[in-house]
Structures are given as C-alpha cells and as structure tokens.
Amino acid sequence: VHDLSLLDAWTAASPATIHAVGLRGFGNAPTPHAQLTLTYPGGALASIIVSWIAPAKQRCVVLGFDRHTIIWDDLVAGSSVQLFNRGVAPVPDPSRRRQPQSIVEHVPVPSAEPLAKAVGHFVDCIASRTPPRSGASAGLRTVQLLEAADRSLAGGLAVVFGSPIPAPVPMRVA
C-alpha cells in the first residue's frame, strides 16, 4: 500500500497496465512474496517487490532520469536522498558504461515514522479544518491499484488499469 500510494503521489498519470507475479500463500494466507510491474503512458516503468518472507525489510526508491538517478532508502536512519550524475541516457563511450557514478548532492531527510506523520497531519487537518494532502480520492486510487494487482496475480496476466473490467494483456519481456 505504501509503495502504491507514493507512486500515485509522484506520478502525473495513472498506469496503463499492472502485472503482478508472486508466490501463492497456503490456504487463505496472503501472498508472501510478489512483484508488481506498472507501465505508464509514455514508456515509464515502475517495479515494486514486496515480501513477508524476506529476511531483511527493504524500502529503497530508485528513480532513473535521462541524465541523473535519485536513490532514497527509507529504512536507513538519518538517510539522505542521493542525486547521482548518471541517468538512463546512452553513454557515448561503451568502455565507461560501468564506471562508478559520483554523488552530486545529498539531501537530508528527517527521520520519522511515516504512519505517525500521516496521523499527525490528519489530526492537524481536522483541528484546522483544512483539506489533507491526500484525501479520499487518493485512497480510492490506491485501492483500485491494489484490486488491479490482485486480479493480475489471480489471472497470471497484466491488466489494463482504469477499464471497468480490466482486460488481460500479455506482457512483453525486454
């Protein structure tokens, strides 16, 4: 839910398709490990891996742009957003493709529990009678994303997001 909410807040468009694959839980148990791939209009791609069975909890966000890459690890106390001077644009000299990327900038991120911040913001909105940063419509979109991912996981195919009855579509492996 957290990752889908972040993607919804960061992207200007809804995904075109959602494809989920994962391990089946025993009986009625939830899926213990899954990967979601969301494709966006214009070619952007997001990948989320969730796991209840992984020995270590991870929450690392990597955003690739044409000339820069941004990395943020939400679980490292006192972490910072790191801006690297290398993106996804082709490198003119193939011999330099794997050279280390240099960090251009560190942006400190205050350490705080996300749920505590969200609840505090909600309480502040009630007290001040102001609308929250993310309201019912954002919650509805997140639930719709979860439902589409669940349908994809059950059917084994990607689903077109936003259609009344999501149509299965075969995924292309690059």
Image (cartoon, helix red, strand yellow):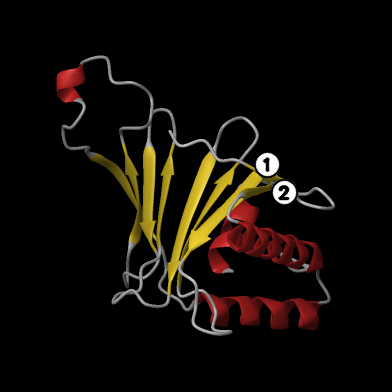
Q: From this view, report whether residue 63 is shown above or below residue 117.
A: above
The local crowd at label 1, few if under 14, some if 14 to 19, many if 20 or more residues have their Cα within 10 Å, is some
* Near-viewer residue (134 or 2): 2
Quarter holding the C terminus is: top left
The local crowd at label 2, few if under 14, some if 14 to 19, many if 20 or more residues have their Cα within 10 Å, is many
Count of labels in the image:
2
Q: Residue at left 62%, top 48%?
A: 158
Amino acid on which the number 2 mark rests in the picture? Phe
Residue 45: x %, y % from top left: 52, 41
Residue 123: x %, y % from top left: 71, 83
As drawn, the label of residue 105 is none
Residue 87: x %, y % from top left: 36, 32
Quarter holding the N terminus is: bottom right
Q: Which numbered disc, 2 or 1, marks the residue that appears first in the sequence? A: 1
**Residue bearing mark 1:** 16
Amino acid on which the number 1 mark rests in the picture? Ala
Q: From this view, report whether residue 12 is shown above or below residue 55.
A: above
* Near-viewer residue (64 or 132): 64
In the image: residue 51, left or right of residue 11:
left
Q: Are marks 2 and 1 in contact (CB under 8 Å)?
A: yes
* Near-viewer residue (133 or 38): 38
Most extreme residue toward the top is 92
Mark 2–mark 1 Cα distance, whole angstroms, equals 5 Å
**Residue bearing mark 2:** 161
Q: Residue at left 82%, top 53%?
A: 165
Residue 170: x %, y % from top left: 60, 40
Q: Secondary structure at mark 1?
A: loop
Q: Residue at left 75%, top 68%?
A: 132
Q: Residue at left 46%, top 37%?
A: 173
Q: Secondary structure at mark 2?
A: loop
Dividing the picture into quarters, in which one does residue 2 lie?
A: bottom right
